[in-house]
């Protein structure tokens, strides 16, 4: 038994000296961000339409179509949209590479470079010659945020509203899990000024922080808390130690038999 204690002690020292890399370090940023640039609170409203965007255009005076005939190329709602958003999809139009969409009675209309509101006013002005007081609603239905980490329903969340916050998208993702670290929620910006903002949701002041306004193609990552990391380390330790312990037990048995 004295040999067994010495062998187990040696194995313990050997295994505890090993380091274990955690999955939550996936989005670690080197250094600290000191030049945080506040986000425009109306960033989705200020989004400029691009090629391959999908527009939903509805005539509020006629919920079937912009005019009384089918217009444009109808497409199905993106698979990433919520069921509610899918129900709302009426006439949808994919912006071509030349920045135009095809509208009945108008032909090809340039919309790339315009905001949602600018596109709505532009199309209303064009249809004013054909319709009496046209009242249109224009939405960009392919804008999205990717959510991963310790949330109950990770995946893609569509940006339906002009003013969408981190709190909104976390709610659509089912909220945080019990393993989450609410003090370390990261928003990875993927635009030309790519950066990582680390937000502390445990601080009430975060509700007034402009950085919680999400943008198209943001990645939201919720890290694990210390307790979850510690439990994972312990589990990894015993998983990795199992072959060593089996080897030690086998060696001990052989050693005991040889001494008889």
Image (cartoon, rainbow, N blue to C red):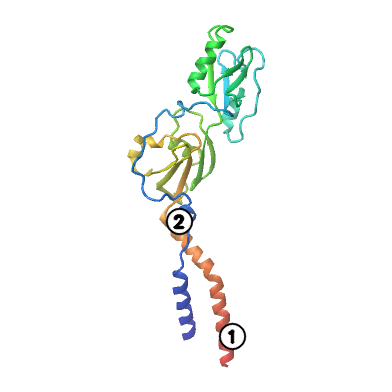
Position of residue 152 relative to residue 53, above or below, is below
Q: Which image quarter: residue 206?
A: top left
Furthest toward the front, the residue is 98
Q: Describe the element under mark 2 as helix, strand or loop.
A: helix
Furthest toward the bottom, the residue is 260
Tell me where residue 67 appears, x and y as whole percent.
62, 12
User: Residue at the location (61% across, 25% down)?
Assistant: 96
User: Residue at the location (46% across, 53% down)?
Assistant: 25
| CA neighbours of label 2 inside 10 A, class few (<14), some (14 to 19), many (20+) | some
Regarding residue 146, the answer to whether it shows in the image is yes
| CA neighbours of label 1 inside 10 A, class few (<14), some (14 to 19), many (20+) | few
Position of residue 168 relative to residue 248, above or below, is above
Q: Which mark is residue 88?
A: none
Tell me where residue 235 appears, x and y as whole percent.
50, 63
From the image, which quarter does the C terminus lie in?
bottom right
Q: Describe the element under mark 1 as helix, strand or loop.
A: helix
Regarding residue 1, the answer to whether it shows in the image is no
Position of residue 166 relative to residue 253, above or below, is above
63 left or right of 182?
A: right
Q: How many marks?
A: 2
User: What residue would you read off at disc 1?
Assistant: 254
Position of residue 62 relative to residue 197, above or below, is above
- Earlier sequence position, callout 1 versus callout 2: 2
Tell me where residue 255 appears, x and y as whole percent.
56, 87
User: What residue would you read off at disc 2?
Assistant: 228
Q: CA distance from mark 1 to mark 2?
A: 39 Å
- Residue contact between numbered discs 1 and 2, judged by CB atoms under 8 Å: no
Q: Which image quarter: residue 141?
A: top right
């Amino acid at each position: 038994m004295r040999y067994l204690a010495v062998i187990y002690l040696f194995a313990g020292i050997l295994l505890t000296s090993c380091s274990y890399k955690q999955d939550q370090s996936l989005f670690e940023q080197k250094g600290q961000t000191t030049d945080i640039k506040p986000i425009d609170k109306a960033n989705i409203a200020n989004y400029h339409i691009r090629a391959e965007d999908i527009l939903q255009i509805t005539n509020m005076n006629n919920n079937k179509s912009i005019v009384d005939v089918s217009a444009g190329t109808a497409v199905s709602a993106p698979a990433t949209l919520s069921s509610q958003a899918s129900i709302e999809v009426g006439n949808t139009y994919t912006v071509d590479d030349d920045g135009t969409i095809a509208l009945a009675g108008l032909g090809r209309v340039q919309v790339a470079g315009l905001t949602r509101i600018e596109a709505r006013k532009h199309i209303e002005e064009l249809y004013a010659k054909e319709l009496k007081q046209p009242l249109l609603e224009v939405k960009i239905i392919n804008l999205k945020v990717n959510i991963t980490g310790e949330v109950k329903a990770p995946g893609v969340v569509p940006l339906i509203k002009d003013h969408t916050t981190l709190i909104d998208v976390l709610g659509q993702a089912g909220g945080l899990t019990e393993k989450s670290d609410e003090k370390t929620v990261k928003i990875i910006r993927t635009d030309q000024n790519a950066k990582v903002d680390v937000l502390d949701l445990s601080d009430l002041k975060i509700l007034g922080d402009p950085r919680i306004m999400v943008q198209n193609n943001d990645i939201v990552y919720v890290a694990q808390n210390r307790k979850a990391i510690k439990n994972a380390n312990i589990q990894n330790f015993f998983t990795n130690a199992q072959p060593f312990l089996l080897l030690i037990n086998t060696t001990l048995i052989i050693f005991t038999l040889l001494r008889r």
